[in-house]
């Protein structure tokens, strides 16, 4: 296989995320939340592997007719922001005006964040919360806290997008990657398990999901505090 074909194959892999997004949206419209999140987990897994493949096969040099960064951002907005926001609104977890506040805050703040040229830090971490509403939503569906807690989390994470806080990329942030990458894998497994069981997973699985989420959310901030 030629270098060009390998590189364009990576773009094709990335583009499958749009298909998974549509499948997730179709499930969401039918209020099939477990199926929606399963498709989002698949999209999340694709997003985790296409970046390393893109760098390995040097898509910028061998497949430069397609902007891989733009392609990735389009799909990420659908799968990380738009569909999870719809799910939080439509599911009834945020009743009345709280649902409207959530979808407005999530979609408005996130589109600004995605266009922010300061999104990436020099160590490939993110500056501010990277609008991973898919991860937040699956934990909310799995744990189902009260709507005031959910609304507080939404507002806090939206504010964190524009705060001087660092959030790691489990694959690209080198510092503590030997721990962060397995934690991200474990998170994906438990998130998929929760969705597969229609959010009737055992209590230890819920705790595992919460603990891995807390690690992924806070480890970048801890790295800011602790010098290398």
Image (spheres, helix red, strand yellow):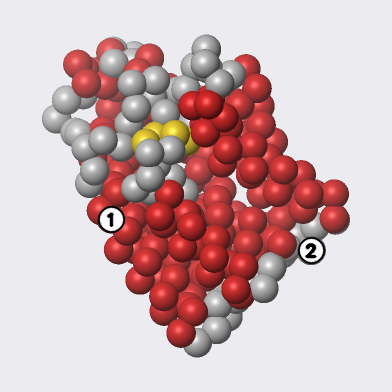
> Where residue 115 sits: x, y (%)?
22, 46
Mark 1, residues whose alpha carbon is within 10 Å: few (<14), some, or many (≥20)? Answer: some
> Where residue 94 sits: x, y (%)?
55, 77
Task: For mark 1, give the secondary structure.
Answer: helix
Mark 2, residues whose alpha carbon is within 10 Å: few (<14), some, or many (≥20)? Answer: some
Residue at left 62%, top 17%?
Answer: 178
> In the rendered image, which residue does mark 2 sit on?
200
Asked whether residue 215 appears in the rendered view, the answer is yes
Q: Nearer the viewer, residue 181 or 19?
A: 181
Residue at left 64%, top 64%?
Answer: 141
Q: Nearer the viewer, residue 222 or 180?
A: 222
Between tags 2 and 1, which lies in front? 1
Q: Quadrant of the N terminus?
A: top left
Mark earlier in primary sequence (2, 1): 1
To which quarter of the image does residue 4 belong? Answer: top left
Residue at left 53%, top 26%?
Answer: 225
> In the rendered image, which residue does mark 1 sit on?
111
> Where residue 51 sits: x, y (%)?
39, 27
Say the numbered circle drawn on residue 4.
none
Task: For mark 2, give the secondary structure.
Answer: loop
In the image as oriented, which residue stretches furthest toward the bottom? 96
To which quarter of the image does residue 140 belong? Answer: bottom right
173 shown above or below 11: above
To which quarter of the image does residue 218 belong? Answer: top right
Asked whether residue 14 appears in the rendered view, the answer is no
94 shown above or below 127: below
Asked whether, in this view, residue 99 is left or right of residue 192, the answer is left
Asked whether, in this view, residue 1 is left or right of residue 222, the answer is left
Q: Nearer the viewer, residue 124 or 14?
A: 124
| CA–CA distance in space, label 2 to label 1 | 33 Å
Residue at left 63%, top 44%?
Answer: 213
């Amino acid at each position: 296989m030629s270098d060009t074909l390998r590189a364009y194959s990576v773009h094709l892999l990335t583009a499958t995320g749009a298909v998974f997004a549509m499948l997730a949206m179709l499930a969401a419209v039918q209020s099939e939340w477990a199926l929606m999140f399963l498709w989002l987990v698949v999209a999340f897994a694709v997003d985790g592997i296409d970046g390393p493949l893109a760098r390995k096969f040097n898509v910028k040099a061998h497949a430069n007719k397609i902007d891989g960064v733009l392609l990735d951002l389009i799909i990420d907005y659908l799968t990380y922001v738009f569909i999870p926001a719809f799910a939080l609104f439509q599911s009834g977890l945020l009743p009345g005006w709280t649902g409207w506040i959530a979808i407005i805050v999530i979609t408005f703040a996130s589109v600004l964040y995605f266009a922010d040229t300061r999104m990436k830090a020099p160590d490939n971490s993110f500056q501010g919360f990277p609008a991973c509403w898919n991860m937040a939503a699956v934990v909310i569906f799995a744990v189902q806290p009260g709507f005031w807690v959910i609304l507080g989390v939404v507002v806090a994470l939206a504010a964190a997008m524009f705060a001087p806080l660092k959030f790691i990329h489990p694959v690209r942030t080198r510092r503590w990657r030997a721990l962060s990458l397995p934690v991200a894998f474990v998170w994906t497994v438990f998130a998929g398990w929760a969705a597969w069981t229609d959010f009737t997973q055992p209590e230890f699985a819920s705790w595992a999901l919460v603990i891995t989420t807390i690690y992924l959310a806070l480890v970048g901030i801890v790295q800011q505090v602790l010098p290398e």
